[in-house]
Image (tube, coloured by chain):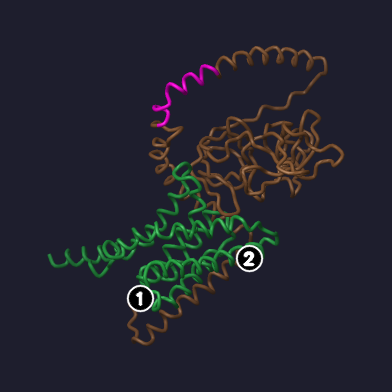
């Protein structure tokens, strides 16, 4: 410990705040000058906290009211009849699917169709919801050897959730489609009309850049498009809904406000959709 | 025998001195857990601002400026805020609170709350401007208004347990 006289010590104490303020301003500039610095530090922090999150999430998940152990026990009976109803509906759809599959195979064989490779995927648990004021992202766990999951597509049971933007050694950040920085090329309706789906920090991303002579139809399905090379063709995102005149938004199928488990699909940027390989357009994120 | 007592006392003092920082960091991390609270992530900044304001006024030694700067870095990294912005903002908040603490120490809860609201208004407006400047994009005002409202509303909830801690477990002089 350095021995300092009282006035010197008081002066030093008074200087700490301005000095730290200057250091922080320098940090802002450094982060601005080198974008990777922030990403790197963020990944390190996420990785360091991942085991903590994982340990802390177990009791929360167990107590959660509508999906956890307590909730499912309370709603056992209602849940059972709902499942039975869904099962009946699904059986009906299975028959339809089998018929369509057979028809599809027959048509493919007539066309000498080259099948796209089946993507590999793994299931990842959402361990932290790291959205903030102007951002929507979640942290997921990674399995031991995940491969290159950068730009991998994240889906829940119903639809596209987002895209992996930062990868650490045991955790990865998924940018949700509702984030302000999320721009996804989409195909609308059976005709596959092109548009961009742009997050606006609310539950429903906005549709922009559609052809003015054929505006998206209310209720039409919105699928991903391989334009830009990040997403593959044809993953379900949501349906079109008009909130105002000439202001269509997408109501996502995915339950973005209560994500627990995600499937991470590694399509690999090289063969996303097959035809626009490697075309990393800056807007397609 | 004397030595052991001395070491225990030093440990106790350290633990008490570190309590405010530890609570801030732990709550910040807990607020990221999905499903714990609705809109928990929106509360994170409000919680940290309330804590920094409270400790700066009632126990300035509990949160030295370097610690506040580090908390700011962590807050920015957990959310998706450009690096360092929250360090600057929290230090500015600490500066404002520090300068007015002699006046505020003698005031009742309502006036301190009002002062906190003014401080938060300045901080979130600066945050909004800084983020727009750093990203060269126009950002919607609504989330900032929401953050301001949540921060002001959460202050009493944060401060009641902190006031207890201030009198008891976070007081190094009681070690």
Residue sitting nearer the eye, A214 or B52: A214
Is the residue under label 2 in contact with that under label 1 (CB below 8 Å)?
Answer: no
Q: What is the magenta range?
A: A71-85
The image shows residue A148, relative to residue B29, as above or below, that is above
Q: How many marks?
A: 2
Q: Are marks 1 and 2 on the same chain?
A: yes
Left or right: A184, with A20 as reference point: right
Tell me the number on the disc at residue B161: none
Residue B145 in the image, given as x and y percentages of width and height: 57, 58
The main secondary structure of the magenta stretch is helix
Instruction: Give the colour of chain A.
Output: brown
| Residue with the mark numbered 2 | B129
- Of mark 1 and mark 2, the one earlier in the sequence is 1
Q: Alpha-carbon distance for marks 1 and 2?
A: 33 Å
User: Residue at the spot x=45%, y=73% of the render?
Assistant: B97
Dot 1 lies on which element? loop
User: Residue at the spot x=65%, y=65% of the render?
Assistant: A33
Dot 2 lies on which element? helix
Subunit bearing disc 2: B
The answer to if A254 sits in the magenta stretch is no
Instruction: Give the colour of chain B.
Output: green
Q: Residues within 10 Å of mark 2 (few under 14, many from 20)?
A: few
**Which quarter of the figure is the N terminus of chain A placed in?**
bottom left
Residue B95 in the image, given as x and y percentages of width and height: 47, 74
Residue sitting nearer the eye, B3 or A103: A103
In this view, the residue farthest toward the right is: A213
Subunit bearing disc 1: B
């Amino acid at each position: 410990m350095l021995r300092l006289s009282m006035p010197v010590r008081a002066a030093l104490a008074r200087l700490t705040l301005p000095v730290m303020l200057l250091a922080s301003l320098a940090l802002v500039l450094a982060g601005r000058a080198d974008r990777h610095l922030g990403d790197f530090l963020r990944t390190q922090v996420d990785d360091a906290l991942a085991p903590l999150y994982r340990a802390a999430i177990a009791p929360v998940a167990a107590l959660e009211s509508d999906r956890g152990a307590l909730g499912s026990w309370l709603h056992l009976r209602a849940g059972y009849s709902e499942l039975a109803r869904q099962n009946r509906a699904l059986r009906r759809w299975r028959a339809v699917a089998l018929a369509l599959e057979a028809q599809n195979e027959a048509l493919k064989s007539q066309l000498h169709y080259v099948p796209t490779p089946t993507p590999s995927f793994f299931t990842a648990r959402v361990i932290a919801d790291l959205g903030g004021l102007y951002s929507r992202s979640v942290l997921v766990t990674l399995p031991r050897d995940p491969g290159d999951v950068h730009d991998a597509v994240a889906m829940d049971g119903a639809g596209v959730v987002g895209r992996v933007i930062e990868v650490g050694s045991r955790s990865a950040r998924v940018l949700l489609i509702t984030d302000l920085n999320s721009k996804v090329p989409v195909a609308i309706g059976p005709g596959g009309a092109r548009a961009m789906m742009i997050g606006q920090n609310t539950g429903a991303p906005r549709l922009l850049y559609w052809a003015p002579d054929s505006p998206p139809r209310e209720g039409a399905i919105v699928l991903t498009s391989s334009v830009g090379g990040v997403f593959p063709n044809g993953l379900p995102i949501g349906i079109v809904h008009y909130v105002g005149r000439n202001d269509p938004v997408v109501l996502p199928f995915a339950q973005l406000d209560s994500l627990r488990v995600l499937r991470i699909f590694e399509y690999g940027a090289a063969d996303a959709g097959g035809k626009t390989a490697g075309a990393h357009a800056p807007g397609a994120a | 025998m004397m030595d052991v007592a001395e070491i225990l006392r030093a440990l106790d003092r350290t633990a008490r001195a570190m309590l405010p920082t530890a609570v801030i960091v732990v709550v910040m991390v807990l607020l990221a857990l999905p499903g714990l609270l609705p809109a928990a992530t929106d509360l994170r900044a409000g919680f940290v601002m309330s804590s920094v304001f409270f400790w700066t006024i009632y126990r300035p030694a509990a949160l030295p400026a370097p610690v506040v700067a580090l908390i700011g870095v962590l807050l920015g990294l957990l959310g998706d805020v450009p690096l360092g912005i929250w360090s600057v903002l929290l230090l500015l908040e600490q500066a404002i609170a520090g300068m007015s603490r002699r006046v505020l120490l003698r005031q009742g809860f309502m006036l301190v709350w009002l002062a906190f609201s003014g401080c938060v208004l300045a901080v979130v407006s600066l945050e909004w401007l800084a983020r727009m400047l750093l990203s060269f994009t126009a950002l919607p005002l609504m989330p900032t208004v929401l953050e301001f409202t949540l921060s002001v509303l959460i202050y009493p909830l944060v401060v009641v347990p902190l006031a207890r801690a201030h009198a008891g477990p976070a007081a190094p002089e009681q070690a």
